[in-house]
Image (cartoon, rainbow, N blue to C red):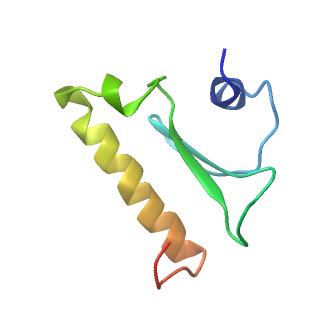
Amino acid sequence: MTLFEKIIARQIPAEIIFEDDDVLAFRDISPQAPTHVLIVPKRPIPSVDDLGENDALLVGKLVLTAKRIAAAEGLTNGY
């Protein structure tokens, strides 16, 4: 089980800032920037090479989640 899968399963604590049926967003435990949020799909996808055409909606949802979180965090000039 990967680190992200353990966070999704609540086996490892995380500061979750967004969650729905498909996506989980949480603050990085060791941030490299003042605002550092990880947004991951709940379904394991090992790499971009493993994405298929049927994943287009999920990938779009990940990007739109990033946009929504950035706005909520006050990041309006690139992120």
The vertical placement of 1 against 31, above or below, is above
Percent from the top left, x then y, of residue 39? Answer: 54, 48
Percent from the top left, x then y, of residue 33? Answer: 70, 68
In the image, 7: left or right of 74? right
Percent from the top left, x then y, of residue 30? Answer: 81, 53
Give the position of the N terminus as an image quadrant: top right
The vertical placement of 54 against 35, above or below, is above
Residue at 45%, 66% in the rendered image: 68
In the image, 56: left or right of 38? left
Q: How many marks?
A: 0
Residue reaching furthest left? 53
Residue reaching furthest top? 1
Residue reaching furthest bottom? 77
The vertical placement of 67 against 37, above or below, is below
Residue at 49%, 40% in the rendered image: 23
Percent from the top left, x then y, of residue 57? Answer: 25, 40
Residue at 53%, 65% in the rendered image: 69
In the image, 43: left or right of 12? left
In the image, 25: left or right of 76? right
The vertical placement of 70 against 32, above or below, is below
Q: Nearer the viewer, residue 49 or 1?
A: 49
Q: Nearer the viewer, residue 50 or 12?
A: 50
